[in-house]
Image (tube, rainbow, N blue to C red):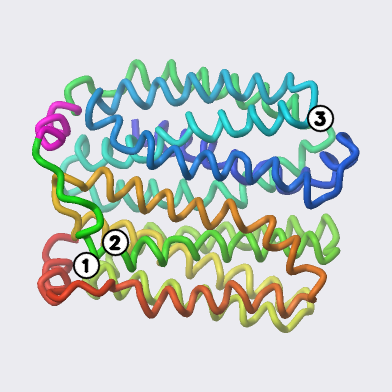
Amino acid sequence: MLLLLMLGAVLVVGQLYVTLPLTPALASRWQITNGQAAWVGSAFGFAYAAGFLLLGRLSDRVGRRAVLLFSLLATAVASVLVAVSMHFGMLLAARALQGLVAAAFPPAALALVAEALPPARRPLGISLMSFAFLAAAPLAQFLATQFAGLGLPAIMLVLAAAYGLLTLGLHRLLPAGVALVSRVVAATAPVPMWRQTHLMGVWLAAVTVLFAFVVFHAGAQTAGVSAGDLQALRLVGLSPLLLSIAAARLVSRFGTVATARAGLLLAAIGLVFGLGGSFGWLLMASVVLSAGIALAVPGLIGTVANRATPDVRAQAIALYTFSLFLGASVAPPVAQALAPLGWNALLLTPIAALLCAAAVVNGWAPSLSRFQSSEHRTS
C-alpha cells in the first residue's frame, strides 16, 4: 500500500513539473511567448494550491479511501482533457481542473499513512512519502525531457492510464475503516485557524521551499543552459532527496523546528554556490539545494503535525501543502521575469526568501516552549 501511495505521490505531484522542460515546445506549438507558455504549469499549480483549501478536509468527512480513489480517477479524466485540448485557453482550463482534483490526493495520503501504519513505522512512512513528493520534481522533469518528442498529449494519455492502474491497485489494498477516526475528530468544534499563530511561521516558510527549487531549475533553463546540462542538474539533485528518509532521526534528536530551519539554511547555501555561475558550481548548488529541501520538508510537516490541535490537524496540513505549492506555482513566472536582470538577481530572490523563512519558521505564539519541548517526545 505504501509503495502505491508513493508512486501516486510521484505521478500526482509530478504534474506540477512535467511541463517545465516542454515550455519552448509549447510556445512553438501555440505560437506564444515562453512566458505565456509557462502558465501551462502555473495554471495547474495555482488550482492545485487552491484545491488544498477547498478539498483538504474532504477526507475527514467522507473517508481517506474514497477521496484517494476519486482524486486519481478525476485526475485521469482531466489528463485526457489536457491531451485533447484544441486551443490554448482550453489547455489552461484543463490544467486548472487537473490541479484542482489532484489536490485531494496528498492530504488524504498523508493522513492515511499516519493512521494506518503501526506507531513504530509512522515516522518512516511519513519520511518515505516526503521523499516521494520531493522526488517528483526532478523525476518528472527528467522523464518529460526524455519523452518530449512524443508531445504533451501523448505524455498526458500515458499518465491517465497510470492513474487508472493506480486506482485499481489502491482499490484492492486500501483499508476501509481508517476514516472512522477522522470522522470523530471532524465532528468536534474546530479551532479557528487564525488563532494558530504557532503554525503561521511554518506556512510562511513552506512558500519558499519549492519556490527556490523551481526558480533555480526554471532559471537555469531560461539562462540558456544546454539540455544535457539541465538533465545533469536534475539527476544530481535526486539522490540528496534521500536525506528526507533520514530526517526522522534528526527530528527525534533536535526537534522538528531545528530540522526545518537547518534545511532552509542549507538550501540557501546551495543557491549561494549557484552564484558562482560555472556549471561545476551549478552542480554543487543542485546537490546542496536538494539536500536542504530534503531536511526542510519533513521538519515542516512534523511541526504542523505536532503543533496543530486534533480538530484542525487535517486543515493545517492542507494549508501547509497549499503554501508549499503556491510557492512552486509562482516560481516559473518569477523566473521568467527575473531572467533579464541576470543570473545573480534571479538567485538572490529565493536566497533572501529562504533566509527569511528560517527566521520565522518557529512562529510567534506566546507559549512556544510548550511546543518545542513536546516535539522531542512526539516526533
Which dot, 2 or 3, sits closer to the camera? 3
Observer-nearest of 167 and 335 = 335
- 296 above or below 16? below
- Badge 3, how many Cα within 10 Å: few under 14, some, many 20+? few
- Badge 1, how many Cα within 10 Å: few under 14, some, many 20+? some
Q: Which image quadrant: the C terminus? A: bottom left
Determine which of the numbered discs, if any, sits on residue 102 in the image. Answer: none
- Circle 3: residue type: Leu
Residue 185 magenta:
yes
CB atoms of marks 1 and 3 within 8 Å:
no
For the point 34% across and 30% down, the residue is: 1
CB atoms of marks 2 and 1 within 8 Å:
yes
Describe residue 348's horizontal placement relative to residue 358 as left or right: right
Q: What is the CA distance from the residue labelled 2 to the residue labelled 1? A: 6 Å
Q: What is the CA distance from the residue labelled 1 to the residue labelled 3? A: 46 Å
For the point 55% across and 46% down, the residue is: 136
Which dot, 1 or 3, sits closer to the camera? 3
Percent x, y for residue 246?
A: 36, 62
Task: Characterize the magenta stretch by its predominant secondary structure.
Answer: helix
- 340 above or below 265? above
| Mark 1, residue position | 252
- SS at mark 1? helix
Describe residue 147's horizontal placement relative to residue 60 as left or right: right
- SS at mark 3? helix
- Circle 2: residue type: Ala
- Circle 1: residue type: Ser
| Mark 2, residue position | 248
- 273 above or below 36? below
Quadrant assignment, res 282: bottom right
Magenta range: 179-187
| Mark 3, residue position | 150
- SS at mark 2? helix
